[in-house]
Amino acid sequence: MLIQRALSRARVLSTSRYFSSLSSIQMQTINLPKSPPFSFSSNNHGCNFLKSKPSSVSSPYSTAAFSLGKSSRKGVVPLAALLQIGGVQIAKDDVVKENDPTNNVPDSIFAKLGMQLHRRENHPLGILKKTIYDYFDVNFPGKFEKFDDLCPIVTVKQNFDDVLVPPDHVSRSYNDTYYVNSDTVLRCHTSAHQAELFRNGHTHFLVTGDVYRRDSIDGTHYPVFHQMEGVRVFSPEDWSGSDMDGTEYAAADLKRSLEGLAKHLFGAVEMRWVDTYFPFTNPSYELEIFFQGKWLEVLGCGVTEQAILHASGRTDIVAWAFGLGLERLAMVLFDIPDIRLFWSSDERFTSQFSEGKLGVKFKPFSKFPPCYKDMSFWINDGFTENNLCEIVRGIAGDLVEEVTLIDNFTNKKGMTSHCYRITYRSMERSLTDDEINELQEQVREAVQNKLNVVLR
Ligand code: DAH
């Protein structure tokens, strides 16, 4: 449990530490599903789970929009149950399959698909994305292509195999990743698109998108967040005049380019490079800056493993790559205290941000009182905290601020009890006792029924 908690916690606080972990899947208590009952065919357009694409799609990387509620495979569906992302139509029942043991996507996650906060110009994530674009446009004019509408539903191969994530890596577990079926996931990082873009001949690109991870609940963890991936390819003529080999040349360029980016975002701050491990790069680094009195990890990066390039049909080249979490940077740049705020449509939040204005400090409109509820139960072998958190979020949505394990003991019979404290707090209003009591009652019932634990 401790290991599991530590892993889970480390990875959103630090986006890249997730993949810098070498831990294998066996460390967690998970139930891997049976083999798939079916598999979807690929349309080769960055969204491989649907059988067909709409005729309006002209480019593999076209824009997304909510569909106007046309019919799906199963007839007419409500407006929000049919999305178009990256030119691909997605119906709710393509993604959420309650009775399918190979699927673990809840309704609450489907509701986030297609929201694309990073494409909103006056949203902190959109403003940050644009500021990073500006840096690359000014320093590498006309070089970097931008993709911010690639479908977040990808194959296991794209998400893991193509970027060399080991078969037993913890990130592949059903406890950590949302599976549509055993071959298809909601991408858990934007690195999922690297191999395809290499294969298609792209040499300089930035991929921004929503990524999905099952996780615990607190002010910096949300099951959907946003990343940007950057990649630059070099060919032998780039490094032949230097006294470096391709890898050294790419690593030096990577460090120079990303130090420039950090300066562009944070000003003249102290920086340091930390050696680390990622399955997809070698060497691998994290860039940290000294900001507001502490060292802050800005991104993970490295020189792309040759095996990824070779498998994509590219030989003779070397590449660098980086990945950064937009929320973690936006939270410090805009002083946003809670990750749930990014999803708020409250005007008191949304009206504070406008295009081009990076770093305008968020003024909290008020801090509403929290309400704490504890619940204790005997866990079973399959119990995981991520499963618990998903149930709580499914019922209380963004009214839940934190779920914390406050007590944990095993009795003489070997039964283990956990006590969790659930903190309820709205970002927008005061909650009434009645409404919290009702939510807590629903949570208790669902936890008992869905997790098969015994309430105490
Ligand atoms: N995909 C990594 C993560 O989500 C972040 C990352 C690290 C991306 C290093 C990269 C990279 O391209 O080179 O944790």
Image (tube, rainbow, N blue to C red):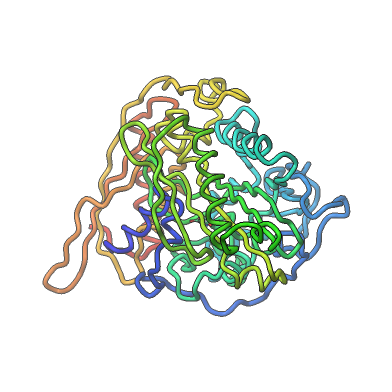
Q: Residue furthest left?
A: 412
The image quarter containing residue 447 is bottom left
Give the left or right position of residue 172, taking residue 453 as reference.
right
Q: Is residue 181 above or below residue 76?
A: below
Give the left or right position of residue 361, taking residue 164 as reference.
left
Q: Is residue 90 above or below residue 325?
A: below
Q: Position of residue 193 (x, y in %)?
A: 65, 59
The residue at the point 16 percent across, 62 percent down is 409
The image quarter containing residue 49 is bottom right
The residue at the point 35 percent across, 37 percent down is 424
The residue at the point 50 percent across, 26 percent down is 359
Q: Position of residue 402 (x, y in %)?
A: 34, 43
Q: Position of residue 420 (x, y in %)?
A: 27, 51
The one nearer the camera, 433 or 228, is 228
Give the left or right position of residue 409, taking residue 347 as reference.
left
The image quarter containing residue 385 is bottom left
Q: Quadrant of the C terminus?
A: bottom left
The one nearer the camera, 283 or 77, is 283
Residue 286 visible in the shown view: yes
The residue at the point 55 percent across, 31 percent down is 124
Q: Position of residue 15 (x, y in %)?
A: 45, 51
The one nearer the camera, 112 or 43, is 43
Q: Quadrant of the N terminus?
A: bottom left
Residue 99 visible in the shown view: no
